[in-house]
Image (cartoon, helix red, strand yellow):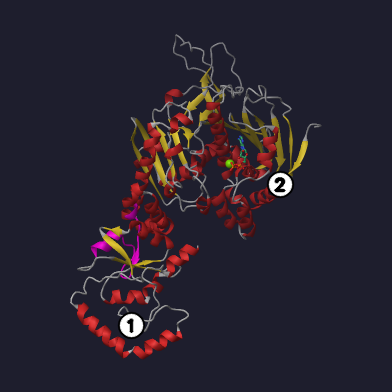
Amino acid sequence: DTQKTKFDYQSDVTRLRKIVINSLYSHRDVWLRELISNSNDALEKFRLTSLTKKGFGNDDPLNITVKAIRDEDEKGGKIIITDTGIGMSKDELAANLGTLAKSGTTEFLNRAENADTTTGTGNLIGAFGVGFYSSFLVADRVYVASRPPRSKEIPEPEQWVFSSSSDESSFEIYPDPRGATLGQGTEITLIMKPDAVKYLSTNVLTELIDKHSAFSSTFPIYLFTQKTEEVPVEEDEPTKEPETVSEPEKENIIDLDDDEALIEDVPTEEEEKPEELVVPKTKTITVDEWVHANSHPPIWTRDPKDVTEVEYLDFYRSTFKDYRKPIGWHHFSGDAAGTSFKGIIFLPEKIEDAHWQQTGPLEQKDIRLMVKHVFITSEFGSDRLPKWASWVRVIIDADDLPLNVSRETLQSSKFIKQMKGIILRHLLILFNRLATDDLEKWALVTKHYGMIFKFGAVEDTKNRDRLINLVRFETTQRQNITLDQYVENKRKGQSQIFYMADSGKTTEQIKRSVFVEKLEARGYEVLLFTEPLDEVLVNTLRKHKKLPFQDVAKAGLKFGDEDGEEEDSKEAQKKLEEKFKPLIEWLKEETKDVVRDVVISNRLVTSACAVVAEALGYTANVERLMNA
Ligand code: ADP
Ligand code: MG
């Protein structure tokens, strides 16, 4: 006890733990998936570090074990979750489990504390995930014993314990009194709350892993189970009471998918067949097994026809730690540089604002490149995705790249070089599929990704044409049309694509603009731009299907149907100018400080007057954009 150090939780942790303990009761199942996902992260960190760091760690198999132990009085019990991952030093235990480093946590806390009902908070947990502290949903006390892998610098790492109870605002850290029982990794012992004893049942745990954690780990999860079995009694062996076999070896593993892999922890002496036919005596014994609980093949390796929507959603949530439903996904396979691969692309509900706030090369942390089911890297070096697509969530699993290939070699490999183009192509396939097959989802795509298509068409010359096809515009006559559709609808003789841009206004307001009136009256369709990006886009494209874009608020406007009208109108114009000379002179004088000129116009149909930009000047809209 003298070695125990007591620490106070950081204040946010205290707040979070309170919320977790008090109001997430109806979502308490999440504790297991959170702990398993932490173990998986720790195993992944270890494996990646060991690829480049010589003499790091031992050769223990990388896995997660879950074991429930009931108290003798059957009233309570504990659950022990162990992994052979990166582990935590004394300082890391305090830092990682005693403070909150997660971005968005403060937002979660504010919203959760203001939510008045438990269901309100329940939805929030779906959106954020609460990590390690979810253990206090089911445990009165939690012990975390941890030991980092051995390294050149520290050949014999110490094993320390973090301990905390659900009703204290402090935790303790001390050297494990048992010594270094772990080769490497972390062992979490939950002393279950009296009302959470149902989790001590193997069936409940199996179901939970199956339902919520099947995809939380790419490393094997072994669940400790005990079964009673009838086995024959040897002739000269005295019949015994049921017995419990002591701590099983980890090799005694049953693969649920493969009956032949059944190796049980039963005595394996050759059974001697009695000569005469006698009814064999049997006895009941308890058999301990470690059952491989997540032995299903990864979903991306399966036939898309056999994967259910729930499986895709679970997989998405646990892989990308995004608790919101993706809009859609696309499951594909192919070949790159002679290596076959399988992959799934997910379209997140929306792109985080934070994504756009990054400066410099964007992080593409959600592109997970695996080799034979093992995560290798998210970084493609110079072959990273363009900005417009770098938010995409995708998993690619290659069949036969060398597993120990260094990141540097991989980044310059032909496989990676081709991967960028392949991912973009499949992303565009997904968008096009949603555009044609699923109007409801396509509406969401337009809402949350409309800007991406425009941005991409400006940025990515290689995919420009395909991206342009995804951009939808509203016009004076129609909604959700492509530029192709605009051009198909052009009037005889029309030689320009007309648009009116006024960002910050609604399309309804733009439609009422005097500049649009005359074109409407003559039956021309006008694109209505409400975002500054629209104008940037047409300035980049300049033309579509050979027709130049024309801002209807600027000079240069040509109608296709004015042949023959010209002479007449020149005459008429002259007459009008004569007639209204006094008015024009007066207006010029009155407005000389604010406008450059006052002229008789033939642009207007029902409006009395309009203020227009100079032919070579900026439109009001671009002026606003420049200011921004
Ligand atoms: P998150 O996983 O989102 O970072 P958690 O609350 O789940 O948040 O975990 C907090 C931190 O504690 C992790 O980031 C990790 O550093 C550490 N941690 C938790 N569980 C383990 C584990 N089994 N092995 C090693 N480190 C762990
Ligand atoms: Mg976590």
- Can you say whether 553 is above or below 439 in the image? below
Q: Earlier in the sequence, mark 2 or mark 1?
A: 2
The quadrant in which the N terminus is found is top right
Q: Nearer the viewer, residue 442 or 277?
A: 442
Dot 2: element: loop
**Quadrant position of residue 133:** top right
Q: CA distance from mark 2 to mark 1?
A: 72 Å
- Can you say whether 354 is above or below 421 in the image? below
Tell me the kind of residue under disc 1: Ile
Quarter of the rendered structure image containing ligand 2? top right
- Could one spot residue 517 in this view of the protein? yes
Magenta-drawn segment: 467-489
Label 2, residues with CA under 10 Å away: few <14, some 14-19, many ≥20: some
Q: Which residue is mark 2?
A: 10
Q: Nearer the viewer, residue 83 or 582?
A: 582
Q: Nearer the viewer, residue 32 or 511?
A: 511
- Can you say whether 331 is above or below 357 in the image? above
Q: Which residue is located at x 41 percent, y 28 percent?
A: 401
Residue 438 location in percent, x, y? 34, 55
Q: Which residue is mark 1?
A: 600
Q: Nearer the viewer, residue 623 or 34?
A: 623
Magenta-colored stretch includes residue 580: no
Dot 1: element: loop
Q: Which residue is located at x 30 percent, y 89 percent?
A: 578
- Could one spot residue 224 in this view of the protein? no
Give the mark count. 2
**Quadrant position of residue 116:** bottom right
Residue at disc 1, CB closer than 8 Å to ligand 1? no
Q: Which residue is located at x 74 percent, y 46 percent?
A: 169
- Whether residue 574 sits left or right of residue 326 in the image: it is left
